[in-house]
Image (tube, helix red, strand yellow):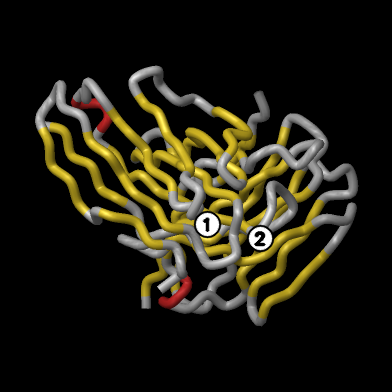
Amino acid sequence: GQQVMQIPQYQHVQEGEDFTTYCNSSTTLSNIQWYKQRPGGHPVFLIQLVKSGEVKKQKRLTFQFGEAKKNSSLHITATQTTDVGTYFCAAQGAGYSTLTFGKGTMLLVSP
Amino acid sequence: DSGVTQTPKHLITATGQRVTLRCSPRSGDLSVYWYQQSLDQGLQFLIHYYNGEERAKGNILERFSAQQFPDLHSELNLSSLELGDSALYFCASSVMTGGYGYTFGSGTRLTVV
């Protein structure tokens, strides 16, 4: 089945530093979605990327979809303590199959 | 409140027992998905229902089953429970079968002792 690799597994930054997590699929995707799960919480949908090379921004968060629609990244500029949590990418293959989640990147931000 | 309701929030049961987890999707959503989350395996897809019909199965054990009722709520039945079944079980819903973000419930934490 579809495999989604996400790196790094864990990152600890100082508040104000930037953060990036990467997601790679073994197959070409219909779309990729990003979710955030706060400690003790549930995954919350952040964004969906559909087009090849697409870039979307949400305040300090920048999401990119690769030209080949096989990889994606999430970049946070100037992290804040409120950014703490696990960020998951979730890939949807051809025919809008169900989402396959990466294992997530846990972000810890120290003040 | 995400709009997806899961009950119970916590469940502690013994090995060999059977439990039922319940999920009410967000109003207007026809698709319901069940995921299992454990520390080492991340979010594992179990099963997907759309408007009462099973649409896809993931790595769901034969001891597990699910259904979606006419009012669109869904139940996940776990039987002959083992210690390894201890995990967080999430239900998520979406409007259609694909191309839309999922709305997750707050989950049911199952502990098998």
Coordinates of residue A23 in the picture (x, y in percent): 66, 45
Tell which of B11 and B76 is nearer to you: B76
The residue wearing badge 1 is: A87
Q: Chain of mark 2?
A: A
- Let me know if residue B101 appears in the view: yes
Question: In this view of the protein, can residue A101 be seen by the observer?
Answer: no
Which type of secondary structure does the marked residue at label 1 adopt? strand
Looking at the image, which residue is at 80% across and 37% down? Answer: A95
Q: Is residue B98 above or below residue B4?
A: above
Density class for disc 2 (Cα within 10 Å; few <14, some 14-19, many ≥20) is many
Label 2 belongs to which residue? A74
The numbered disc on residue B40 is none
Residue B22: percent from left, percent from top: 34, 49
Q: Is residue A24 above or below residue B64?
A: below
Q: Residue B6 appears in which quarter of the rendering?
A: bottom left
Q: Is residue B52 left or right of residue B74?
A: right
The chain letter under disc 1 is A
Three-letter amino acid code at the position of disc 2: Leu
Q: Residue at x 40, y 28 (%)?
A: B65
Q: Secondary structure at mark 2?
A: strand
In terms of depth relative to the viewer, which is nearer, A93 or A16?
A93
Q: Residue at x 51, y 36 (%)?
A: B45
Name the quadrant of the N terminus of chain B: bottom left
